[in-house]
Image: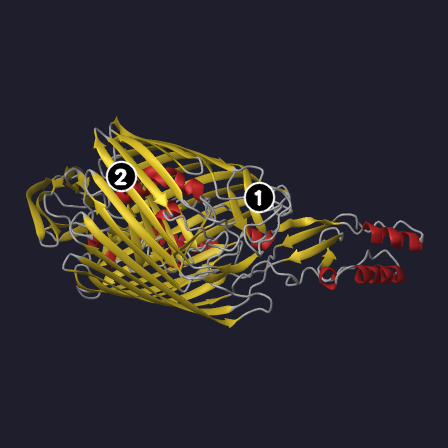
Amino acid sequence: MKKGIFICAFILLISAFSQAEDPGRIQGQVTKAGKPVDGVDVAVKEPSFSTITDKNGAYSFDRIPPGKYTLIFTQGKNSITKEDMVVTAGTTTQCDVDVEWAVLLNHAVTVHAASRRTERIVDAPAAVAVVEAAEIERESAHGQLPKILETIQGVDSTQSGLYDYNLNARGFNSNLNRRILTLIDGVNMSMVNLGVQIWPWVSSSLSDFASLEMIRGPGSALYGADAYNGVLNITSKDPRYNPGGNLSFSYGEQDTARLDLRYAGSLGRNWYFTVQGSYLESQDFIRSRNESVEYAGLPMEVVPLPDDKLKNLNAKIRLDKHFANGNVLSFEVWGMGDKGWVFCTGVGRVQSKRAYQPLARLNFKSSHWNILAYGYQTNWEGISLGSGKPLSIDTYRLQAELQGFTDFAKGRGRLVGGFSLRREGADTSQTLFLDPKDEHMEALFGQADYKLTEKLKLVLAGRLDFSSLHDLQISPKVGVVYTFNPGHTLRLTFNRAFQSPNYNELFLNMQVKPPVDLSAIENGLSSAFGMDLNLGFKSIPVLALGRENLQVEEITSYEIGYSNLFGRKLLVNINGFRNQLKNFISDLLPLVNPSYGPYAPPSGLSSSVQTAILGALRQNLPPSLFALMSNNLDDGSPIFAAVSFINAGKVNAQGVELNLKYFFNERWNVDLNYTWFDYEVKEELLGDKITSNSPEHRINLGMAYISDRFDASIRYRGVDDFFWAAGVFAGPVKSYNLVDLTSNFHLGDGFSIGINISNVLDNKHYESFGGYILRRHAVAGVSYRW
């Protein structure tokens, strides 16, 4: 059935997107003082074609008949005309433009991930915020990508240590949060078994990132599982448009030392390359909890921290071939590794002892097609600090995706469609799962945009997801965008999305506490009956267990968004949403897995002996512990089925996100955003308290000064108190107020010095219950560009 669907889809894609051989092409780049300008309207006067420049300032027109043409470049009231552009069959005409006009503000920024195609941020059918390369560079000394995003409206980022984050949006955060799908150039680098990001790895290439697009709200209609609350789309710099080198070194508190190198250039014959690498070594705010804890309510641990320092190494090589017809072929290899990273899980803290991940990516882009293939393997070893048990996992992921896009109805409509195939697996050497797992996923997706009028655009999108981990999922999206005038839009959207259970929730079989010794009971019974019972009571494991019949979590969302740029000075964004959520996968809970019933003695024993065994256990064990005693499904040996998972709960949630940004001039700006979030539990399982793990109120205020020689910014972040519950970590998080400061001075001849201070006032606080006490972290850096 699935093969038939994919064959039909392939035929339809070829029919929809295949075009006759291009008679000719026009391409070029729009720059200002050598820097790319995105969001510029580029139109061919006759016949009528139009497009906009992307983040590289690049544009192109295909299938242009031979002849002379006039190109018009427009942004707001500014315009430049290029006449007599000659196009001949089978060739590409280059038309680059360097403008002198004042570049318009944020409403000209382009995004890609909202529709899987370049469009202005104000035309996108989703709530999107963008951090561009210049801002990433100003903030990069601390080496923490989620910290760059934590002050965006609607973003809920909790920091457990210097490099342990849970990035979320619109409620229901958690330890090992995976409700935001994170992609780097289309690659999902999450841990296969958990679905979460290893943030030290994601942050290791900050110098090579061109933009961060944060899409808030469900995104399964185009991206499938785990785009539950949004998508973080990270784009790397194109070596053709970002040549040169950058070497930087930073050092700061907690003995933080970071070295970063990036160099890009041309190899000739339209071949371009990037080499990039980084090394990070740092202590953290973490401390051992085997003798004492930082604050009341934290569980004690069995072993101290084996290592008090994080080390992270990253290296990447990328090659791009630009063809004369505008097609681009990219190939890259990437290797990442770390040790010492500590993160909180539902069963306690875990420290990484050794981890590495080699990755390869191949990407072909043309005017109507994007073909992506990638694969990686992750080898990880760690230790559970709560039980002292070593952990090990080997995983792999192979994925291929074909996407086509084209215009129709003389440019009034746009069509994007494609399909994706994925194979992945995990082997934990029986430390997390009993057996290796190999799974597969297939998906079909598409989106159609159509301008009903010059101001009103209709958006229809949807995706079918097939998987060996869950039933068929259908994720629809409907949206309308009304444009009053450039930079002034109103948006209404309807979305459905889902989150698949991860491997741990489905297949977990992990020791969470030291084994229980009941040999005294076994010896007493053996003496009483005059026989060796061999009950296996000497070392009974205490286990956290997965549940293979879990359903996907589902969310239905209704959203309204409004944005306007008043007088080219004040940018206003307002988003309101109403979400309906169901089938929550619970935290690890006792007595919820029906596969593990009450303990039964070996069936080969007489009924009188079995009765005596059960009576002795009831008499000597606390009732709560006896209730957890069960049998191993494979060999019948005794276990304590301590905790497992279950689908439970329905919740209605709503919120408002407000952002105001005022530009005094091209150098000074001030930014204020506020987020309100509330929820109501409609159904809840007894013993499982559903909490959003998010504050009701968050506010961010920042001011920045940016010039060619000097830049400085100061930011305030205020977070309301809230309750956090994630597995063994459950308790209150007190409100906190933080101030961050960043400053960079450009000395000339390519040299710069800067400082980044997080939590300037040294407000000792924790941001999730179970997280560490966070303090000030100051890092100074020096860099050289050439």
Q: Which residue is mark 2?
A: 744
Image coordinates for residue 479, horizontal then vertical, percent: 30, 65
| Mark 2 crowd level (few <14, some 14–19, many ≥20, 10 Å Cα) | many
- Residue type, mark 1 in image: Ser
Residue behind mark 1: 288
Is 681 situated above or below 514?
A: below
Left or right side of 10 for 520: right
What's the CA distance linking mark 2 and mark 1? 36 Å
Question: Hey, what amino acid is under mark 2?
Answer: Asn
Instruction: State whether residue 368 appears in this view.
Output: no
Residue 113 in the image: state x and y as whole percent: 32, 52
State whether residue 173 appears in this view: yes
SS at mark 1 in the image: loop
- Mark number displayed over residue 16: none
The x and y percentages for residue 361 are: 39, 38
Q: Are marks 2 and 1 in contact (CB under 8 Å)?
A: no
Find numbered disc 2 in the image and state the secondary structure of the residue it sits on: strand
Question: Residue at coordinates 88% horizontally, 53% vertically from top-left?
Answer: 524
In the displayed structure image, the side of residue 507 where residue 274 appears, left or right: left
In the rendered image, residue 613, in percent from the top left (x then y), is placed at 84, 59
Farthest-out residue, top: 268
